[in-house]
Amino acid sequence: MLTRSVAAGALVGLLGAACASAPPYSGWTAEQLYEHAQRAFEDGDWGEARRAFERLVLTFPGFDQAVEARHYLARSFFNAEEYLSAVSEFTRIVQVYPDHERTPEAYMGLCRSYAGMSPHPQRDPQYTIQARTTCRNVAGDFPGTPHGDSASVVALEMHNKLGRRAYEEGYFYLQRGVLESAEHVFLYVLESYPDTDATPQAMARLVEIYQEWGWEDQVEEFRRRLLNTYPDSPAAQELLLPVASDTVPTVRSRAPPASG
């Protein structure tokens, strides 16, 4: 037969085990969860903030600060660089609560989240393109506001990155002597990214290509365009430097494309 002290000890042990196996935040009110999650967010504990806010919105969907909770949940994902999850939460806010005061911030969150997923210029530009499109839309929907202005800056960054990627593709062909392909890509840069740093560089490379082909009219045309349109660019300044006698051309000699 168990003595009272042994039985009491066993009961305490069972209660302790039950408490240990209870789910996180068991028995907490919505207000307690919200306050705890906010403190974690303010302390930069993104993992704890995310867990608490997730529990809050799932357990208390009718909570009067549910949109605020989702806003901070999305920002917790963003700050932890979990951008896909951040996109999901920001999207939920703009779709379910289109008239809420947090919605403009959610749109900006989408802009920044896609930008966060934008890779190195040489990799797949899918998210860079998505970021540019989203940020341009935000800038257009909220003109003259802090969110609109910030989105415009991010959109320009993404546009520059895409221009850089296109230029590097052309340079790849140039270095391997595939001049027709390089010319095609550099002309595309001029057409699609005229307002980026890649454009004067593309013009300078076109000058090199046309010099290789002996196309003097095109050489003069693109020299003039580069010096007149982007006179302060490094590419334009390079054209003005004297060419050393022992300078090795940056492109391999190739015959120009056949006419007709």
Image: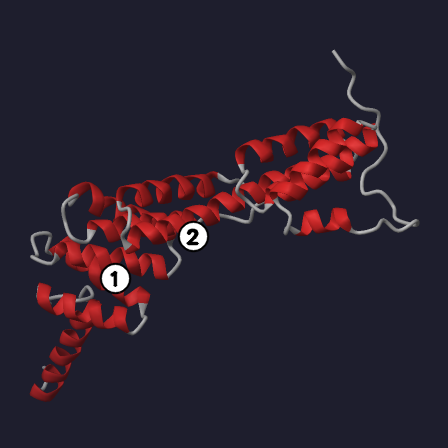
Distance from disc 2 to disc 1, alpha carbons, whole Å, reads 22 Å
Q: Secondary structure at mark 2?
A: helix
Q: Is residue 234 above or below residue 184?
A: below
Judge left or right: residue 4 versus residue 201: left
Closest to the observer, 19 or 255: 255
Residue name at image x 71 percent, y 51 percent: 237
Q: Looking at the image, is mark 2 or mark 1 nearer the viewer?
A: 2
Mark 2 or mark 1, earlier in chain? 1
Screen quadrant of the N terminus: bottom left
- Pointer 2: what residue? 116
Screen quadrant of the C terminus: top right
> Which residue is labeled 1 in the image?
51
Residue 198 badge: none
- Where residue 73 appears, x then y in whole percent? 25, 58
Q: Residues within 10 Å of mark 2 (few under 14, many from 20)?
A: some
The image quarter in which residue 164 lies: top right
